[in-house]
Amino acid sequence: MVSLSDLFARRRKEDRNGDGPVHPTKVLERFLAGLAGRPQPVLLDLGPVVGTNVTFFGEEVGCKILVEDLSKDIDRYVTEGKLEELPAFFDTRFPQQSEAIDGILCWDIFDYLDRAGMERLARQLKRVLRPDGVLLAFFSTADPRAGVRPTYTKHVVVDRAHLEYRPYAGSRPKQRPLLNRDIQRLFEPLRITENFLLKTNLREVLFRKPPLSSRVAPGPTAG
């Protein structure tokens, strides 16, 4: 008889095909802690569907997972020659109601957007995130290399402390990296609770939306 833990480990092993290196992650554990204790949290994943990730987050925090693969949207606008229309598309991309999501996995999607696209996407993510909700995002700190074939990265959860970076073909190369202060401004009023710069030239950032109790109430209006 196979235990649930053995079955889970086997599924993860079967899904991994050795395409990408495995790297440590310092923020994933804290992201999970931010979801712990919530009754049936809702998780929004902006990457492609990864079966073992769905199993992992379902077993770790008992959440409902919504997958909105933004890399497909970016590719469509690139191939159709309408990339300048992508920022406006984000305004209506997410059907979720405001403050309906407990946690958001952005992965490295912001690396592939220009400033207008970043701002419009961040605005929608801040809208759907619940008070005290958490958002995880990765940002490259290295300038993009010219002449390199564009690729996206599928982030496969190995365990709470490790991710496999599995590259796959894309149409949009990474753009110039954001400075740390620009990342902070992009997501205001979300607060950065964890910020790690890894040896892989990747910045892992965990944001939290302020709870309702910490928001400043409007002052009295003049009579």
Image (cartoon, helix red, strand yellow):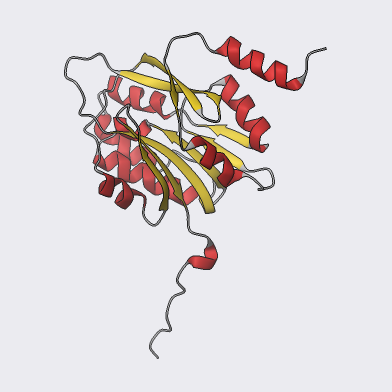
Q: Quarter-wise, where is residue 139 in the image?
A: top left
| Closer to the camera in the image, 123 or 135 | 135
Left or right: 212, with 4 as reference point: left
Q: What residue appears at the point 28 percent right and 35 percent down from the top-left corner?
A: 85
Q: Residue furthest left?
A: 146
Residue at horizontal 25 percent and vertical 40 percent from the top:
178
- From the top left corner, tell me how far across and down residue 102 is, in percent: 56, 46
| For residue 39, above or below residue 168 | below
Residue 80 visible to the viewer: no
Residue 203 percent coordinates (x, y): 34, 36
* Total tally of numbered discs in the picture: 0
* Percent position of residue 123, x then y: 38, 48
Q: Is residue 152 or residue 207 the one in the foreground?
A: 207
- Which quadrant would residue 201 be assigned to in this image? top left
Residue pictured at 51% horizontal, 29% vertical: 161
Quadrant that contains the N terminus: top right
Is 76 in front, or is 180? 180
Residue 189 in sight in this render: yes
Residue most toward the front? 199
Q: Going by the picture, which residue comes out furthest to the right?
A: 1
Establish if 125 lies above or below 70: below
